[in-house]
Image: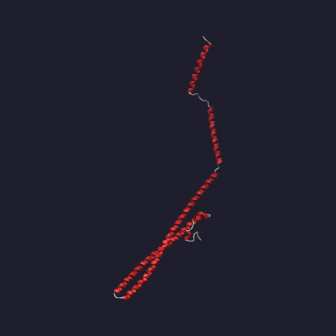
Amino acid sequence: MGIFTRFRDIVTSNINAMLDRAEDPEKMVRLMIQEMEDTLIEVKSGCAGFMAEQKKAEKTLAEVEAEAAAWEDRARLALEKDREDLARAALAEKQQLIRRAETLRQQVEEYRTLVANTQSDIAQLEAKLADAREKQRLIIQRRAAAVNRLNAQNRIRQFDTSEAFMKFEAYENGIDRLEAQAGLVNSLRPKDPSLRERFEELEHADTIERELEELRRKVRPS
C-alpha cells in the first residue's frame, strides 16, 4: 500500500507533519511525489474519459432531437393528407424520442458535473504536487548545505593550526637571523671615506697646521 490510498488522502494530507515524522524525509517526499504523479495521471485520464462521454452524449442528444423534429414534420404531413393514423404513429415516435432526449440531457449534465469536479480535483492535486516538489527542493538544499558544513569542519579539524603557527614562527625567526647576519657583515666591512669626508679631513689638517704655527711663534719668538 502506498503513502496515499485515495485522492482525498493526498489533498487533505499535511505534508510538513508527515515529513517531520519521517526517519528519511528526502526519501519520504520522493515517494510522495511519485504517488501524486501517478494519481494525477489517473485523475487526468478519468477526466478525459468523462469529457469524451460528454461529447458523445451531446452528439447523440442532438441527433435524437433532430429525429424528434423530423417525426413531428411527418405527423404534420400525415394530417395534411388526412392520415390521422399515420400522424398518431408519427407523434408516438416523437414522444419516445423526446423521452430518450430527456435521459440524454441528464447524462450530459452529469458528465459536465463530473468533468468540472475532476478538473477541480486536478487543480488541487497539482497544487499539492507543487508543494511537495518545493519541499523536496528545500530538503535537498538543506542536505547539501549540511554536507558542505560537515566537510568544512572536517577540513578544519584535519588542519593542525598550532603546528602551522610553529612553522610560520620558525620561518620568521629564520628571516630575522638572515637579516641580523646581513647587518653584521655590513658593520664589519671597512668603509671608504666619502668625498665630503676627504675634504673635511683636509680642512681639519689646515686648521691644525695654522694653530701649530701660531703656537711656535708664541713659544719661540724671533
| Picture mark count | 0
**73 w.r.t. 33: above or below:** below
Q: Where is residue 179, by image quadrant?
A: top right
Residue 15 at least partly seen: yes
Residue 45 vs residue 163, the one in the foreground: 45
Q: Residue at x 62, y 32 (%)?
A: 187
Q: Where is residue 1, by image quadrant?
A: bottom right
Q: Position of residue 7 (x, y in %)?
A: 54, 70
**205 w.r.t. 162: above or below:** above
Question: If the image is split into quadrants, where does the C terminus sit?
Answer: top right
Q: Position of residue 31 (x, y in %)?
A: 57, 66
Residue 52 vs residue 154, the one in the foreground: 52
Q: Residue at x 35, y 86 (%)?
A: 79
Q: Position of residue 217 (x, y in %)?
A: 60, 13
Residue 27 at least partly seen: no
Residue 171 vs residue 19, the one in the foreground: 19
Q: Residue at x 60, y 18 (%)?
A: 211
Q: Residue at x 59, y 16 (%)?
A: 214
Q: Position of residue 177 (x, y in %)?
A: 64, 38
Q: Name the outermost residue toward the top.
A: 222
Name the colour scheme: secondary structure
Q: Where is residue 190, by image quadrant?
A: top right
Determine whether, in the image, residue 29 is placed left or right of residue 93: right
Residue 131 vs residue 139, the one in the foreground: 131
